[in-house]
Amino acid sequence: MRSSMQCRGVMVAMLFCAVAIISLSAQEANVGSEKTKQPNKAASEIGRQTFESTCAACHGLDGRGGERGPDIATRAEVVRKTDEEISKILQTGIPQAGMPPFAALGPATLSATLKHLRLLQGKGAAPALPGNSGKGRELFAGKAGCSECHMVEGRGGFLGPDLSSYGASHSVSEIRGAIVNAVQRSGSRKGLAKATTKDGQTVSGVVRNEDNFSLQLQSLDGALHFLTKADLADLSFSSKPLMPEDYATKLSASDLDHVIAYLLSVAHEQQAKGTVAREPKKKSEFEE
């Protein structure tokens, strides 16, 4: 009898130990999973920062090209290159085209940069949307009034820049800040320009082109006006930005989430289809 009870006690103890080991293993697995997520997140941030500080000066923040470098986000001949081929280019550069080698950044940084480029090419996972993109589309064209100035996928106004690909190179917090903090955006020319000629005529609109001798304004009716600075008596800019300053109160937090979700989803869909159009580079896409 005593032997039988001892065996049962041993079996219970072994079972307890087994359960404890399994529980501990599960906890360690969860901890390991969280530790794995953090390095992945850190690597993603390193890739973005490296691209913006090293590559964007020539290829643009969105990878669609600039004054000194070609489009590497949507050009088919670049997109279809393998990771190994692009890694080699990053390491050795293209001297004949003026691209220096970046091997000194190290394999880990180059790998993270390549992954960020793939995201710009639409090959990464779809961005996490803060709201409902369908509701955002309705707000963009309705209550928010964004489409009065901005165009998305060929629909909307012309006074502001096209926002079709804005979500490809801006985070949720950056987009939110650009919407609700119009006054704090960089740039001194946020409002309408008013040009007065020496013969008393006035033209108000958005500056589209300017050099030392001339100015091109687009008035609110869409007409373009070419003015010679020698003929101007005055040129001033409104202190009130074109971008409404009351979005923080006009739109609820969920409204803002929906609009941001719409911009992010449109940009990602265009990247995935390879139909993202190239646009002139600007200090801020919401600016002007």
Image (cartoon, rainbow, N blue to C red):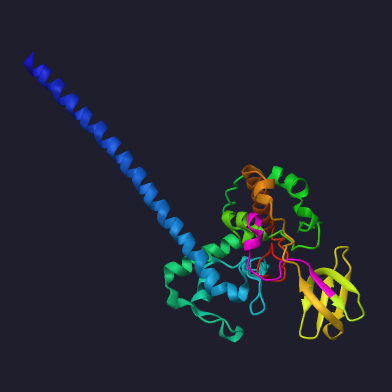
Q: Place residue 134 in its image quadrant.
A: top right
User: Which residue is outermost to the left?
Assistant: 2
* Position in image of residue 104 (x %, y %): 43, 78
Q: Observer-nearest residue: 66 or 170?
A: 170
Q: Is residue 260 left or right of residue 15?
A: right
* Position in image of residue 71 (x %, y %): 66, 71
Magenta segment: 179-195
Please tell me whether residue 271 belongs to the stretch shown in magenta: no
Question: Is residue 226 visible in the rendered structure shown here?
Answer: yes
* Position in image of residue 4 (x %, y %): 11, 17
Q: Quadrant of the C terminus?
A: bottom right
Q: Observer-nearest residue: 153 or 100?
A: 153
Q: Place residue 14 in its image quadrant.
A: top left
Residue 140's place in the image compared with 281, above or below, is above
Q: Is residue 98 left or right of residue 226?
A: left
Tell me how many marks there are: 0
Q: Observer-nearest residue: 97 or 47?
A: 47
Q: Quadrant of the N terminus?
A: top left
Q: Is residue 282 left or right of residue 46?
A: right
* Position in image of residue 16 (x %, y %): 22, 29
> Looking at the image, which residue is at 62% across and 71% down?
60
Please tell me whether residue 185 belongs to the stretch shown in magenta: yes
> Looking at the image, which residue is at 14% across and 22% down?
9
> Looking at the image, which residue is at 59% across and 75% down?
57
Residue 151's place in the image compared with 94, above or below, is above
